[in-house]
Image (cartoon, helix red, strand yellow):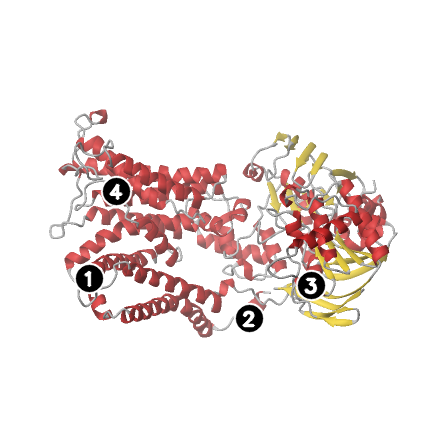
Amino acid sequence: MASSTRQRLPSGAGMTWRYVLDLLPAILAPFFGIAAALLIIVLILEWQGADPQVAWNYVYEGTLESAAKRADMVAFWMPLAITSFGLVLAYTAGLWNIGVEGQIMIGAIGATWAVRLFAESSSPPLGLRLGRDGILFLCFVFAALAGALWALVAAVLKTRGGVNEIFSGVALNFIAQTFNMYLISNGGPWQPPGSRATETARFPENARLPSFEEYRRLSPTTIYITIGAFVVVALIMYVSRWGLQLRAQGKNRKSAFLLGVRTDRNVLGAMALCGSMAGLAGAFRVLAPDVTKLTATPSGGIGFLAILVVLLASMSAILTPFVSFVFAVLSKGGQRLESGFQWDHDLLLDRSLVRVLQSTIVLMVVLAFGARNRFFPPRSAQPAVDDDDVDRT
Amino acid sequence: MRVELQHISKTFGRVRANQDISLTFEGGRIYAILGENGAGKSTLMKIMSGYQSADSGAILVNDQPVTLSAPTSAIAHGIGMLYQDPLDFPPFTVLENFIAGRPGGLFPDSENARRTLLTLAERFGFALDPDAYVDMLTIGERQQLEILRLLSLNVQMLVLDEPTTGISAEQKSALFSVLKSLARDEGMAIILVSHKLEDVIELCDHAFVLRRGRLVGEKTIPCPISDLVALMFGKVIERQERPAAVCGAPVLSVQDLRMVSHRLTVEHVSLEVCAAEVIGLAGLDGSGQAEFMRACTGLYPPEHGVIHLHGRDMTRTPYHAFKQAGVAFLPAGRMEEGLIKGMTLSQHFALTLPSRAPWVNWMRARRMTGERIQHFNVKGRPGSPIQTLSGGNQQRFALSLLPQRLRLLLLEHPTRGLDVESANYIWEQLLTRRADGTAIVFISAELDEIVAYSDRILVFFGGRVTLVEDPAEMSANRLGELIGGRL
């Protein structure tokens, strides 16, 4: 039996070549997608009478050209990346955590609450008079717990009530947004007295993240926490038994359950962990050295962007940092391009065109993956041509 | 009207749903197409009604070859199909549904249609209000509406798929008398697709039996019910001589179980299974065996009754508690419930191997996989994704995944879709486990398998069970009658 198996395998060199051939479509798909997207973007700009070169200069100038711009881009990249890491866990377990946007907002609210309790209050709980490090630590703990709890609402609704997490997620996003507006607008409890702006007052000195000497808007703390989250997620996904269980139940929840996986418990765990990372992203956003206040849009759409990142990275923990980097460049570059469209006489176009261009890239990459799956299905997805199973019903 | 099917074959992937089926239907007669789930009945009916096309073979209507490209072209050739779930539009009225699907431009002649509907309804004694909304009707009334609609389109052959599911006894007798009169008086050909033997015996003149995609026989009715069972389930072979089960300690004890599903209520099920005993669950598909088996493993909470495992009350405990108590359950749909498409053999092992460590020891998992697949004769490598294995290999692999010490093993159709050699191999493995003291309970649609391997047989019919204590003393005919509902 063993010998017959061996006979069907090609020899060493042939096999390596076959693996490379198998891998090629997978590697090339995103490149073809991006190339097709760039071609379409160039065509759109030409058709609108704008110079693509000028447009690219804006994107480049807005993100990568100078060290200061690169620092700004990284400050945007970190919350996006950490949210994406959390989503890798949820999506691997087959949980379409659309509620991640709300979890970011609730995390931001949690961090702000910690600031109010421990930094601004004259009588902090338990009489704790903390220094900056202690206060910031509690801000992150509060943000992570708040995000986790918000995600657990969706998880419990799913395991106990059979409510699809997509529907509860949409509802919880809306509730989170409304709750945030209640806190900071129209004389809400967190709006400074006499202010008409929908935001809290700026946080006191001892609740501000440390920043780099030369780049005041970027904080090293967010980078350390994000790297830590990446290590945790990579260990879970590639080493741990739990990661294997999440993968199994994401592919087939019923089979995984019958094979002995505690699927409901894992739904709660994966959602809570995802929510806590989203909550940390919320804390990054409000504590950022150039913000230090709770605004009307603490998330700024990072949650939805992270969903795209994870889908394009095919839920791979290793690819996620790179894909989120590309999206950070596109987003920050897009902002710069928007002002170019408004003021540059060579580029006078509608600002909303930036969104069209960004969406074109996403669509094209997704399309390229779809084309790959259709025309070059991965070997594992092809049914075997096996010798002993020809005449069966 | 004469419809002839010649050498119809149809495959889905590697499943041969229909293999070289040739049948002839004559006007004026009522036919039955019998077969268990998966025998190929529905595929054949869909081909006849133009819903699907055959891979090869021909359909002749009145000796003229025809191409049925869509249900409308089948209707144009006089073949109408009544689906199990009526294909109507519930938010609309009876009359609107009656008009839908009829030829006639943008502005249907509703007065004319109403007259046609009422005339037809009167003729067959159906009390249908043209202005009633369809979602207020019973399934039986919706069926009547669908029959009238097909008749108004001048169909000459009516195919009915499981028409007696979900309708009342009165509606059933009304339906049957209408079908009889359509055949006798109008010369129509009526085809009943069913696995309900009592309906077939009551209504039909002739039965075709399908099994595993092939036409395995035909009978003119009346005939003994056990003959039809034998055709549906395969020939009952003589039981091999085998040492009688030495009944050990009771493993599973079920008392007065009552299980309610939307289709069926199964009541008064009691059974004691002792160690090293094999119990076969026989019965037509959907008679409650599957629910019973799931109740015995914590997947289907019974409404009433108690389940003991080794003297411990396990009623309404979750599946994982059963699993920890040494119960394993292998469902029929391997790739849907049991194995995980897209994961490799060693990933399956890593998932199921008991271990307290939070990480996976991949070296150990790969080594174990190699040993087990060799022991269970699985053709595949530890790194092969599970879906690349053939059915027989998947089943052997599923068996190799089970813990080595088990008290009770529950199997649903353990050899469905396997060839004789693979099936024998599976049973060799199962009997080894039995020799180690594992009690085995299995469901099968093959009578010979049930008779050959069971120490006792529990027969399910219409929500009741009959326990056959000594299958060796039991004639095949008697077993066939029990399955067909003759107590």
A228, above or below A112, in the image: below
Q: Are marks 3 and 2 in contact (CB under 8 Å)?
A: no
A45, above or below B211, in the image: below
Numbered disc 3: what chain? Answer: B
Badge 1 marks a residue whose secondary structure is helix
Mark 2 is on which residue type? Arg
Numbered disc 2: what chain? Answer: A
Rounded to the nearest whole Å, what is the CA distance between mark 4 and mark 3? 60 Å
Q: Earlier in the sequence, mark 4 or mark 2?
A: 2
Q: Residue at x 83, y 52 (%)?
A: B180
Q: Nearer the viewer, mark 4 or mark 2?
A: 4
Q: Do we see residue B238 in this rendering?
A: no
Dot 2: few (<14), some (14–19), or many (≥20) neighbours within 10 Å?
few
Which quarter of the picture shows residue B326?
A: top right
Q: Do we see residue A271 in this rendering?
A: yes
Q: Position of residue A69 (x, y in %)?
A: 17, 57
Badge 4 marks a residue whose secondary structure is loop
Name the residue beneath numbered marker 4.
Answer: A296
Name the residue beneath numbered marker 3.
Answer: B47
Name the residue beneath numbered marker 2.
Answer: A8
Do marks 4 and 2 share a subunit?
yes
* Relative to B356, B200 lies left or right: right
